[in-house]
Image (cartoon, grey):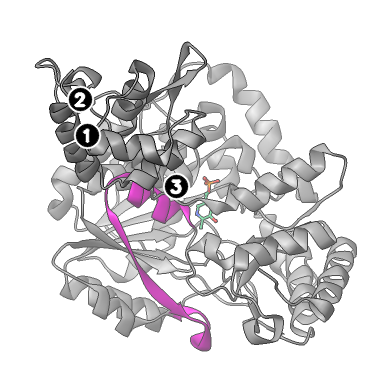
Amino acid sequence: MSREIFAERLRVSMAQQGKKQVDLIRAASEHGVKLGKSHISQYVSGKTLPRPDILHFLADTLQVDADWLRGGDSGNGIHTVHTTNTVTGDRKMRTFKKSSKLDNVLYDVRGPVVDEAARMEESGTQILKLNIGNPAPFGFRTPDEVIYDMRQQLTECEGYSNAQGLFSARKAIMQYAQLKGIPNIAIEDIYTGNGVSELINICMSALLDDGDEILIPSPDYPLWTACATLAGGEAVHYICDEQSEWYPDIDDIRRKITDRTKAIVIINPNNPTGALYPKEVLQKIVDVAREHQLIIFSDEIYDRLVMDDEEHVSIASLAPDLFCITFSGLSKSHMIAGFRIGWMILSGNKKVAKDYIEGLKMLSNMRLCSNVPAQSIVQTALGGHQSVREYVEPGGRIREQRDYIYKTLTDIPGISAVKPKAAFYLFPKMDVKKFNITDDEQFALDLLRDKKILLIHGGGFNWKQPDHFRVVYLPRIEVLKEATGKIADFFSYYKQQL
Ligand SMILES: Cc1ncc(COP(=O)(O)O)c(C=O)c1O
């Protein structure tokens, strides 16, 4: 091994990876490899050569071939396998890193604060969880008829179904969409999925090339940003304005459109804000989408959880000339999040999306089909009596709990909120000056450690300022009372210390 060639190749590889000597020292210490400052500077200047184990560590870290780095003719400067060899004593151990595709993916709804809560639970601490919108653990039971019908059909659901879903399920979804005024739909425009989650992933993977942009709300339901990023696209966040009932800021949307913008996502009713968009706001979004020829993705999973006698309008009903995909499912309205059933409806101008639709078909074929027992009860769930209405009418559980949490939290000095009109979330604002808050994740951790209450900080929803958090108000009022009492106490003394 020639010292000059090795040094030259080491410098080139470091430059290619954007790594400095200090980065290599840090990586070595993380992997338990002994590599000091003086060693690395001697390698870089060509004064000494590394031992074989160190050579392998450097090659792996810089993602180049070890033979090539050593100065050999074989191999090249590019590693294709994403693995790392570290050295423990004399024994080489191969370790596996996650794909770099995940580097910019954020999904804090189940992130570090949740991990800390899990650790605390393991050590015997009881945690009150106000962090995820999962109705069943809070006593919201699936309608009996749904369970009964699933039981009846179970033996007929043993095989795969059509990749897009059972005819009966898709027919029921199609009729539901027709009632909502969604134009130009047929059975082949309906796709069932293992929850809306799976379909979001499919839609983003099929659409986005590296660097393509998609407009996503801030705050958002973070799966949208995560899937767009994972697909190689760039999630460009437009602001939803708290001063205007959390409606999308149309000027901000306009400002953020570029030649690479392919689509806009709206979440209506919204998670995490609980906002419900009126027709006039939706019309403005349609106008912008029309002007710039954007696809509209509308996540409407909370469309049947609307309060205060308001009515939900599907944006696709206002855009017959545009290509729209509308998402919904039974996780929230029928309290069967665990059954995993959601759907998407392709509507409007499908001609412009012929090729994209082929991609959607390909990806749905690749996962064979969605959960068939869950598909079997879509018709039952969507037809007839809708038990969810009782929850959102005056005196209903969700409505009462909404009123309770809104009042008790906004009574706390330094906390304000827009009253939600739908779903089961509140997204309060904290007076960051009063509480000295500069890091909202730290706030969530402090609340967890002090009061054993788990909620998600605003940053988990791609909200850029450290001044919000989301509360799920699914627990019964007795539980909310205890929680809000503790939260009020926490804010009576909290001053963030970093
Ligand atoms: C806005 C939004 N979209 C999609 C989902 C995922 O729903 P599913 O259970 O159908 O995957 C959720 C779940 O919380 C949500 O809040």
Q: Gap between marks 1 and 2, in whole Å?
A: 7 Å
Please, is residue 156 above or below residue 199 in the view?
A: above
State yes or no: Cβ of the residue under disc 3 lies below 8 Å from any atom of ligand 1: no
Depth check, front residue: 30 or 51: 51
**In the displayed structure image, the side of residue 30 where residue 388 appears, left or right:** right
Residue at coordinates 13% horizontally, 17% vertically from top-left? 72
> Of the residues shown, which amino acid type is indicated by label 1?
Leu
Q: Amino acid at mark 3?
A: Ile
Check if residue 239 falls in the magenta segment: yes
Res 335 seen here? no
N-term mark: 3 or 1: 1
* Residues at discs 1 and 2 in contact (Cβ within 8 Å): yes
**In this rendering, the label closer to the viewer, 3 or 1:** 1
- Which quarter of the rendered picture does the N terminus lie within? top left
Could you tell which of marks 1 and 2 lies nearer the N-terminus?
Answer: 1
Report the front residue among 78 and 219: 78
Name the residue beneath numbered marker 3: 173
Whether residue 147 appears in this view of the structure is yes
Q: Which residue is mark 1?
A: 10
Q: Which residues are magenta?
A: 222-247
Real-space Cα separation, disc 3 to disc 1, in angstroms:
59 Å
Q: Secondary structure at mark 1?
A: helix
